[in-house]
Image (spheres, grey):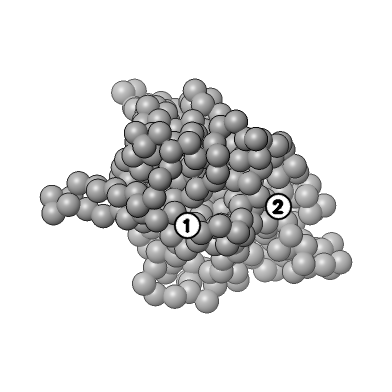
Amino acid sequence: MISHGKDIKIFAGNANKPLAESICRHIGIRLGDSVVTKFSDGEISVSLYESVRGSDVFIIQSTCQPVNDNLMELLIMVDACKRASAGRITAVVPYFGYARQDRKAKARDPISAKLVANLITSAGADRVLTMDLHASQIQGFFDIPVDNLLGSPLFAEYYANKFGEDADDVVVVSPDVGSVSRARTFALKLGLGLAIIDKRREKANQSEVMNIIGDVRGKDVILYDDMVDTAGSLVGAAKALVESGGARTIYACATHGVLSGPAISRVNDSYIKELIFTDTIPYPGEVASEKIKYISAAPLFAEAIDRVYEEVSISTLFR
């Protein structure tokens, strides 16, 4: 007998319903009956049309654009389940917004990631399940358990199938020094070499490539990062790798495709041949891009949710 809930129920806000439905299909249950709308003045309205009393509830909601609306939907859904006597509530946040505001970069800066962690905890969540936090230390901002899944196994499988035995001339590149640890782990999974882009960021969403550390001449390159926002850094790194480093072909992948502002047009006009994301964030563009493709994170989240419910270790998902 599972002590924390008599059964499992999954609900979703409006941020990424297709991902939630796909997760439910992999688990073999239906998505919970709920409606999240707005009142005429913009306030969020949540209605749960089935009992959650004593159930192990999972609420799937990425806090992507519109960030504040999706965050409020999550908080109110958690509160609704708590007041309806759910046995346990897990906030499944495939993309955790505000994660880049994880420290004071200058005087009088807020630490918004900590504030969001406090809000989710205060709303009544008992644990959090997410993927590739921008800064791993955000797990410590919560006073409840946090499982931070990794997108790298999904990409490692994709590129292992893509390159097969012809991977001698492939190298993984970290787009900045801060992502070196993430890129090194990814390179080790594939048995590939590693290079690093040294860049200087003058202000938010603007950076300048300074140096390329490592040999990429004549090689196929996989640029690996956790997210792509305006794509300025990624496109700049691809340009430097080709024009200064002599790289042959540029592939890129990132867990979260934020793709705000001019991102899609920048990718289309860049040296990048193919850009792969997971579906933690829906494709936001009205114009399709032949270069941008998606692989599903639903099987990984489905297994994690099932393991959390069954109270068994999920550590195998990190390997």
Amino acid carrying mark 1 in the image: Leu
- Residue appearing at x 51%, y 26% in the figure: 144
Q: Where in the figure is residue 89, as x and y percent of width and height?
A: 47, 36
* Tag 2 residue: 153
Image quadrant occupied by the N terminus: top right
Q: Position of residue 220 (x, y in %)?
A: 72, 65
Q: Secondary structure at mark 1?
A: loop
Q: Which x, y percent locates residue 2?
A: 62, 35
Percent from the top left, x then y, of residue 42? 18, 50
Is residue 217 in view from this perspective? no
Above/below status of 147 relative to 306: above
The disc, 1 or 2, on the residue closer to the chain's N-terminal end is 1
In what element is the residue under mark 2?
A: helix
Quadrant in which residue 286 is drawn: bottom left
Q: Amino acid at mark 2?
A: Pro
Question: Viewed as shown, does residue 313 lie left or right of 133?
Answer: right
Closer to us: 257 or 178: 257
82 or 253: which is nearer to us?
82
Q: Nearer the viewer, mark 1 or mark 2?
A: 1
In space, the residues marked 1 and 2 are separated at their CA atoms by: 26 Å
Instruction: Identify the residue position indicated by label 1 in the image.
Output: 31
